[in-house]
Amino acid sequence: MKTRGQAAALQTDEPEESAGDRSRREILDAAARFLRSHGYHATTLRDIAGAVGIKAGSIYYHFASKDEIVAAVMNDGVDSVFDAVQAALRALPKTADPRRKLEAAIRAHLHALLDRSDYTSAGLKAYSDAPEAVRQAARPHRRRYEAVWDGLVRELVQADLTPRGVSREAIRLAVLGLMNWSPEWYRPRRHSIETLAGEFAAILLRAERMPVRPRPTAAQRS
Amino acid sequence: MKTRGQAAALQTDEPEESAGDRSRREILDAAARFLRSHGYHATTLRDIAGAVGIKAGSIYYHFASKDEIVAAVMNDGVDSVFDAVQAALRALPKTADPRRKLEAAIRAHLHALLDRSDYTSAGLKAYSDAPEAVRQAARPHRRRYEAVWDGLVRELVQADLTPRGVSREAIRLAVLGLMNWSPEWYRPRRHSIETLAGEFAAILLRAERMPVRPRPTAAQRS
DNA sequence: ATAGCTGTCTAACGTTTGTTAGGTCAACAT
DNA sequence: ATGTTGACCTAACAAACGTTAGACAGCTAT
């Protein structure tokens, strides 16, 4: 049932991708691009096929239905941002300041959403339009990812870094909503993901903005 | 902008709604409901007509195209939440605490989005899927509404209630994103709009949560 | 050489979509 | 009585949709 990574654990070399595997991957890539920019209903199998260089009917050699493609894209998208955030958190020392963890997670999420993976934003956009069966298949992936943020928020609350009297759920909904709405307004030329991540983290915390440790243009005040 | 209030004022000076006007309004109401829950492409003229009790072709007596309906719903939706927020702000004394203004605006926005008007949420959901012509027609309405929030954020910044070093734009995008994502997770049985409004306002501000003031007549200004 | 598998093609199918043309029928004005 | 208008209907149109069946070229293994 896994869509991609299964051959990754092969013993010696790279998976030796066959022609069929490459087509299958290209179909998913194209589907993710169309789903991201046009949504579920406006993404047609003929569009996808055309982008891959084959005919619409040929898709059915690789997938049983449109919804199977959509489900694969959506689940890969959630797993992808899950992995990205987990990796970003693991790159920090376990005892790191929860504020830094929050900012790292926000940065990873925004990167996945806005410039790294069509899959993540495709899943986000197509979810509410997809048939119930597809959404149901995606639910475990989504829950697993939400749990990451719930843990993060829990740490913040325990460190007393969030406004008092605000439920953990509200904070999680706030941070996810704030990020997930960004595809609606983000323009690569106009916004910097790095800057946005820092600003969003600062907004969500009670305390002042964190000291600027690694880089860029953060201090235009003072 | 009136959303429902069917025979609100039977007085002599009311417009005397004709049968055609009522049909037109019912078409828009039904379109808003479908657009809200199913989005642009999954909302069909036959669905709308069926909900009103007429046939699909008859819609063209009232509207020139599907997109004209969508544009009307979208623009009414933005104007509706604009009016609601403006009214909520005007109900406050001009010199009111900016924190209170923020909370009032958030509450009004959430109410418009989640339980008062199908139009507002319909416009939000359908916007990115609608043809460019429809989006272009909606842009002035959206800009006017954004300006309200920009003014609100400006007040907050001037009162030093926001984290320092964070741009006004980031704050505005944060608060709007946080609210506009709520249709994705809000469940009326599970969440309370009043509570959410207070929590979101608290999250966005540097200071502690505001004291719960029982009555507005007290002079709290020192 | 032959058989089989892989990956794609052509060509259609049944359905649904937005839209249009022309008809119908009651209410009203003359 | 007659003509006009308002509001709706029927019936279709072309296009586009997801999907399917069957054919066909290229490769591999016998």
Image (spheres, coloured by chain):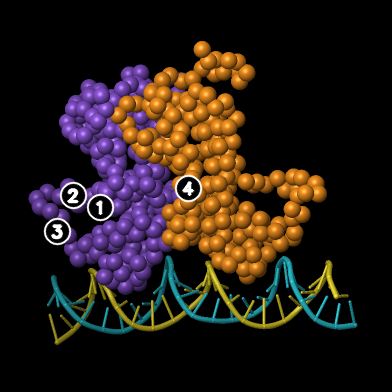
Chain colours: A purple, B orange, C yellow, D cyan
Q: Quadrant of residue C27?
A: bottom right
Q: Residue at x 49, y 43 (%)?
A: B145
Mark 1 element type? loop
Q: Residue at x 58, y 47 (%)?
A: B118
Q: Nearer the viewer, mark 1 or mark 4?
A: 4
Task: Give residue B142's mark.
Answer: 4
Q: Residues within 10 Å of mark 3 (few under 14, many from 20)?
A: few
Q: Earlier in the sequence, mark 3 or mark 2?
A: 2
Q: Are the residues flagged by discs 1 and 4 in contact, CB closer than 8 Å?
A: no
Give the residue at the far left of this rendering: A12
Q: Do tags 3 and 1 sit on the same chain?
A: yes
Task: Give residue A16's mark.
Answer: 3
Q: Are the residues flagged by discs 2 and 1 in contact, CB closer than 8 Å?
A: yes
Mark 3 element type? loop
Task: Give residue B92's mark.
Answer: none
Q: Residues within 10 Å of mark 4 (few under 14, many from 20)?
A: some
Foreground residue among A215 and B93: B93
Residue D21: x and y in percent read 40, 77
